[in-house]
Image: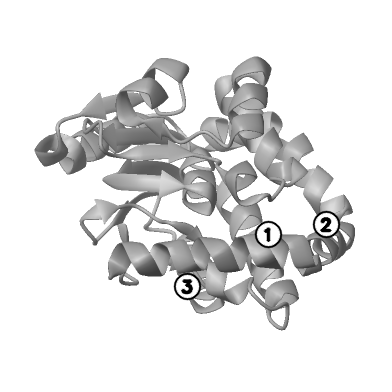
Amino acid sequence: MMKFKSPPVNSLSLEFLTEFSISLEKLENDRACRGVIITSALPKIFSSGLDITEMCGVEHSSECWRAVQELWLRLYGSNLVTVAAVNGSSPAGGCLVALSCDYRIMADNPKFSIGLNEAQLGIVAPFWFKDTFVNVVGHRIAERSLQLGSLHPAPEAHRLGLVDELVPEEKLMEKAAAVMAQWLALPDHARQLTKTMMRKAVLDRLVAHREEDIKNFITFVSKESIQKSLRMYMEMLKKKKS
């Protein structure tokens, strides 16, 4: 099991992303490990997504974005069985982490929400976020959700297919373990080849356009209008905390 623990909201900082990728690589290389349950050690939040403070000002943006790419390539293409036990809200990059897993179970709490809400910040979700989302919920739901930057409460997320199951919060880990056992009952080789067949085209697309994607992100996030939007969002978060 891998538990996110980066208070207060498990933001995907460069340090967090790097540690996540290294931990996943270690599990991949451990022959005794066939699957991993990904969850949060913090109450009410799975992951809040990219660390906005690292996007305000573009000094670290390139390195940070490359780390986001690296994490997605490793998680989406993992040979392990990956089960997301979503025990709190999961916007933006947090949603991407859950989408990248093989199976998503969410705590049945209408106060918890999940979605790619980048549009609310004036940010365009990159093509590989979009591709991952479309592969889970279908084109029409993804198009509408991405344009509106929707955050879907847990019951709606389940209805849309964004998460596979809803269970009471206290049963979440028990259910995740049961799902993992079900997936591990199959021969690894056939499952892994099938997963590769289903996901390879999407993974290859980012690999082929990785530098271009970083350049596009830096150009976009460097715009004064976007920086202003991010600063306003950070001020709003500070007011919420105070």
Q: Which mark is residue 213?
A: 2
Q: Residue furthest bottom?
A: 59
* Amino acid type, callout 3: Phe
Alpha carbon distance from label 3 to label 2: 21 Å
Circle 2 crowding by C-alpha within 10 Å: few under 14, some 14–19, many from 20: some
Q: Earlier in the sequence, mark 2 or mark 1?
A: 1
Q: Is residue 175 left or right of residue 33?
A: left
Total residue callouts: 3
Residue in view at x 14 percent, y 31 percent: 168
User: What whole-number distance in Å separates the C-alpha atoms at marks 2 and 1?
Assistant: 9 Å
Three-letter code for the amino acid on which mark 1 is drawn: Gln
Q: Position of residue 144 (x, y in %)?
A: 63, 23
**Of the image marks 3 and 2, the number of the one nearer the N terminus:** 3
The kind of residue on which mark 2 rests is Asp
Camera sees residue 34: yes
Q: Identify which residue is drawn at 33% across, 62% down.
A: 240
Front residue of 110 and 228: 228
Which residue is pictured at 59% across the width and 75% down the height? 54
Q: Please give the residue where the numbered disc 1 appears in the rendered image.
A: 69
The residue closer to the viewer here, 51 or 190, is 51
Residue 29 seen: no
Are circles 2 and 1 on residues that touch, CB within 8 Å? Answer: yes
Residue 75: x %, y % from top left: 55, 52
Vertical placement of residue 1 versus 107, above or below: below
Q: Which mark is residue 16?
A: 3
Badge 3 density bin: few <14, some 14–19, many ≥20, Cα 10 Å: some
Q: Tell me the residue at 40%/26% (across/down).
A: 157
